Image (cartoon, grey):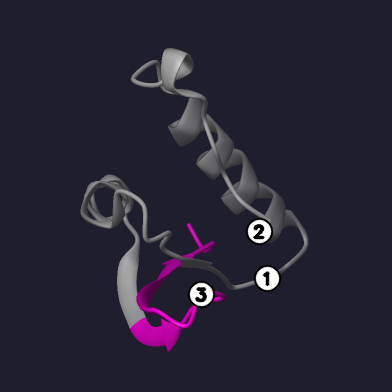
Amino acid sequence: ASLYVIPECRKRGVGEKLMQTIVLEAHKRMYHSVFLFLSQKEKNTLKTFYIKRGWEFFDHAIDNDDLKTDILKISTEN
């Protein structure tokens, strides 16, 4: 599963709203955290996007392309 906003709709708050909806739904289902793997494409831009919105570095992992990537985590608790 991926969160993707097509380029012509970026910088309009769409990605942030999708992310907030996912975290809220996880909270409703009583999950304590949400995790994500950063895509290799635009990795630093994506990491900055999520960190600014409260996500934290959790760990490193190997992705589906056998490349080292970061895992980020956010709490669903208010």
Q: Are marks 2 and 1 in contact (CB under 8 Å)?
A: yes
The residue type indicated by label 1 comes to Tyr
Residue at which label 2 appears: 27
Residue at which label 1 appears: 31
Which secondary structure dominates the residues rendered in magenta? strand
Instruction: Report the disc number at residue 65.
Output: 3
Callout 3: SS: loop
Residue positioned most to the right:
29
The residue type indicated by label 3 comes to Asp
Residue closest to the eye, 48 or 65 = 65
Callout 2: SS: helix
Q: Position of residue 66 (x, y in %)?
A: 47, 83
CA distance separating discs 1 and 3:
28 Å
Q: Are marks 1 and 3 in contact (CB under 8 Å)?
A: no
Residue range corresponding to the magenta coloring: 59-78
CA distance separating discs 2 and 3:
31 Å
Residue drawn 59% across the image and 73% down it:
32
The residue type indicated by label 2 comes to His
Q: Is residue 44 left or right of residue 46?
A: left
